[in-house]
Image (spheres, helix red, strand yellow):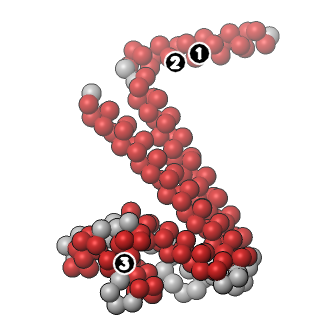
Amino acid sequence: MAEAEHYDIEEMIEMSVARERRAGEKVASKERREAAAAALRARRAEVEERAALKRMSENPALPTEGGNGGPSLDAPPSFDALERIGMSVFGTHWEGKLGAQAGIEERSIRRFRAGELATTPEAMARARLWAIETAAELLAAAGEADLAGEVRAREQAMRLRNTERARAVHAANLAKAKAKAR
């Protein structure tokens, strides 16, 4: 009976492959699988970030996301958030200094401030990661290794989430481009 079931499965797979080929969807099917896999990786990164947040919440000295009354870390990027990061570290003339440290062009920061350009998620992500990395270094230098470790765990989770999101967007864009090319 196992052979009969195996044969049925093999036959169904062959029929499915033939159907996809006839419909010209072989490439599209692969792209859908890749996009689904990228979405799953992004979801896994979010779960890992939540686990890091949970570890942080177990330490009452570290506020959880939104727990200190600040904005959510997943809030849309805004110049105000970017400005808070820059001002808190560098003071009034922060644009060029933050830009150099976080890898954001000073001209882009000036355009964000003037409203000529919307603050991009990439710029905000770079600024946040730089701020968190800097905070971990400062905590370690101050002898707070346990807090620095928690902040570094948060940083790693954010980097992983950003990477997975970028992969998911890239896979979706590739699928759109190939579908358009047909």
Residue 95 place in picture, x, y as percent: 32, 79
Which secondary structure lies at badge 3?
A: helix
Q: Amino acid at mark 3?
A: Lys
- The residue drawn where x is 59% and y is 80% is 138
Return the residue nearer the eye: 31 or 103. Answer: 103
Q: Which residue is mark 1?
A: 12
Q: Which residue is mark 2?
A: 16
- The residue drawn where x is 63% and y is 13% is 10
Q: Which residue is mark 3?
A: 97
Residue 51 place in picture, x, y as percent: 68, 64
Residue 37 in view of the camera = yes
Q: Nearer the viewer, mark 2 or mark 3?
A: 3
Q: Could you tell me which quadrant the C terminus lies in?
A: top left
Return the residue nearer the eye: 140 or 48. Answer: 140
- Left-right relation of 57 to 110: right
- Residue reaching furthest to the right: 1
Return the residue nearer the eye: 101 or 63. Answer: 101
- The residue drawn where x is 35% and y is 83% is 94
Name above or below for residue 170 compared with residue 95: above
Instruction: Give the crowd class for mark 1: few <14, some 14-19, many >=20 residues within 10 Å.
Output: few
Q: Hey, which quadrant is residue 37 in on the image?
A: top right
- Rounded to the nearest angstrom, the CA distance separating label 2 from label 1 is 6 Å
Q: Are marks 2 and 1 in contact (CB under 8 Å)?
A: yes
Q: Amino acid at mark 2?
A: Ser
Q: Nearer the viewer, mark 3 or mark 1?
A: 3
Q: Amino acid at mark 1?
A: Met
- Rounded to the nearest angstrom, the CA distance separating label 2 from label 3 is 58 Å
